[in-house]
Image (cartoon, grey):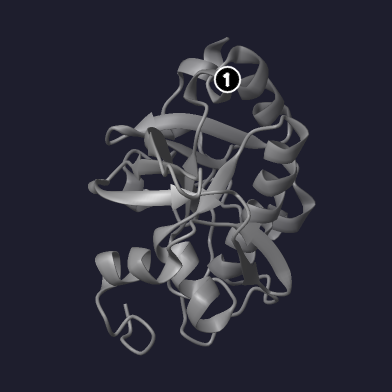
Amino acid sequence: MKFAREGISECSSLQCSYSTQCTTKNETCCAYILKHFLVFLDGFFRRHNLTYVIIYGTLLGAVRDHTIIPWTHDIDVGYFNSTYLHSNEIRSELYENGYHLFEALGMSRLCVRKNNSIKNWLTTQIVHRKPPTVMGDLSAYIDLYTAAKCATNPISNISVYTILANNNFLTPISFERMAEIDGQTFPTVDNVHEHLVYNYGNRYMTEIR
């Protein structure tokens, strides 16, 4: 399957705004695209019994403002079944739904594929722009961080994981903790405060990042 081997050049060029005034309800904003991206991924993972958690900047926006950060380029997700996610079956279904799963800079990522017919984003697609060649060319995408189980808490019986990019930080995940984005809840790590302090510092609720 050719699309399974294509890299970033298979992604669509999207034009959207990172203005601090942007919201997930404004179709010209990248946050609007990212919110729909996350909602799709949540439903897709649930249909395939794939577990995931929102982490890093996506969790920061959920905790701080209950929405997507207006100036972010991506959704941050930790996932737990790399083999199945990268199977031809999953790649094919993602492609048919207008998305492209690819590898870049040592990790998996998901973008809107070119020549798609997703109605929500047709107005943001730049048909005549050259295909993207580096991650900086993409306006909106999902970063998929692999999570590896390393232990189980003998008292709570909750599994403890390390997540790519934070291999020295232990993260308990029971899949019962939820974070709210625009009135919809998404699974996240159990140690939300510690996770955000570790990645963004003690002033994560007030500092602009």
Secondary structure category for the residue under label 1 = helix
Query: Would you say residue 14 is visible in this rendering?
Result: yes
Q: Residue at x 54, y 83 (%)?
A: 65
Q: For this rendering, which residue is in front, 46 or 93?
A: 46
The N terminus lies in quadrant: top right
Q: Is residue 10 left or right of residue 24?
A: left
Q: On the image, which quarter does residue 188 sit in?
A: bottom right
Three-letter residue code for mark 1: Tyr
Image location (x, y in percent) of residue 111: 53, 42
Q: Quadrant of residue 67?
A: bottom right
Which residue shows up at 56% across the image and 25% down it? 85
Report x, y in % for residue 175: 60, 49
Residue wearing tag 1: 84
Residue 207 percent across, percent down from the top left = 31, 86
Left or right? Give the position of 130 relative to 113.
Answer: left
The furthest residue to the top: 1
Q: Position of residue 56 (x, y in %)?
A: 39, 60
Residue ranking furthest to the front? 155
Residue 146 image-quadrant placement:
top left
The crowding category of the residue bearing disc 1, from other C-alpha atoms within 10 Å (few below 14, some 14 to 19, many at least 20), is few
How many numbered discs sit on the rendered protein? 1
Q: Is residue 46 above or below residue 69?
A: above
| Quadrant where the C terminus is found in the figure | bottom left
Q: Is residue 51 left or right of residue 136?
A: right
Q: Residue at x 49, y 59 (%)?
A: 190
Is 161 placed above or below 106 here?
below
The residue closer to the viewer here, 86 or 161, is 161
Specify whether residue 115 is in view.
Answer: no
Decide: is 102 above or below 127.
above
